[in-house]
Amino acid sequence: MRRFKNNYKLFIALMTFWLLLNMTLRPLNLIAGVLICLFVTKFSEGILYNYRGFIFKRINIKIMIPYTFNLIKEIYVSSFSYIKRIIKKDCQPFITEIELRVKDPLIIAIISNSITLTPGTITVNADGNKLTVLSLKDCKEGPETVKKEIRENFESYFLKG
Amino acid sequence: MIGKILLVVSWIYIFFGVLGIFRFSNMYSRLLTSSKIDTVASITVMIALVFYTGISEYTIKLLLILVFLLVTSPISNHIIVRSAYLNEVPVNQKEVKGWKL
């Protein structure tokens, strides 16, 4: 019970998500929601939170809103260039390593996810702030362009804040 | 109208994604192409459906699913590529073994 008191925020967030997805207040639905949310909250211990509360620092919403719009823009811009690459078939994939300047694990996870969401690049591994990225972008210009794009399009947002 | 256009755009993305999977012979290239369908096409389908349904309770559901997709869909791609990389599948491999290309 004491543990649950520490982590009620996660439970409320999950329950809100459940209710918004189901849009119904039927008892069976509510019981199922409560059970699943309790289950997820229990197994998130040590990953998302500990006895002090959430492990990760909250990210400024003023950074996340423009970042999300920029991410969606990047996804579409890259998708067009990737379609060209599929038609021309002029490229072989390569792996490159990039060392980020940000140190926060949550921000590194967000950047890694964004790299994978962008067509033509996938994050293979993350070791601290060093990311291993698989890419099929700009084969002529090489890995430097990929590193520059990641720094300018994703990392720069978090360095400003 | 916008919803229909976006649905057609998503079909184009899916078509080129499938075409890419058959055109590329390297395993990593194929994974990169399949992840493209996962992200761009699914996001476009969701946005198209938001326009298609108009403002209703489904809009909230669709936007929630879109957020959920944005957060979770890269994980599966990441795990597949990571397992291939850790199993030392060569990046410059010309053909996938056992596949008639």
Image: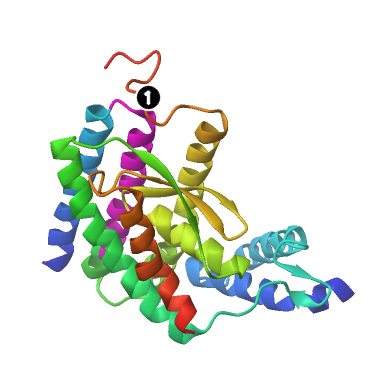
Can residue A133 be seen? yes
Secondary structure of the magenta portion, mostly? Answer: helix
Q: Secondary structure at mark 1?
A: loop
Q: Identify which residue, A50 or A136, lies in the foreground.
A: A136
Q: Is residue B40 magenta?
A: yes
Q: Residues within 10 Å of mark 1 (few under 14, many from 20)?
A: some
What is the quadrant of residue A36 in the picture? bottom right
Q: Circle 1 sits on which residue?
A: B93
- Read off the magenta span: B25-47
Q: Is residue A156 magenta?
A: no
Residue positioned 40% across, 16% down in the render:
B97
Residue A34 percent across, percent down from the top left: 69, 66
The outermost residue toward the right is: A2
Structure colour scheme: rainbow
Residue B67 percent across, percent down from the top left: 43, 66
Q: Amino acid at mark 1?
A: Gln
Q: Is residue B61 above or below residue B39?
A: below
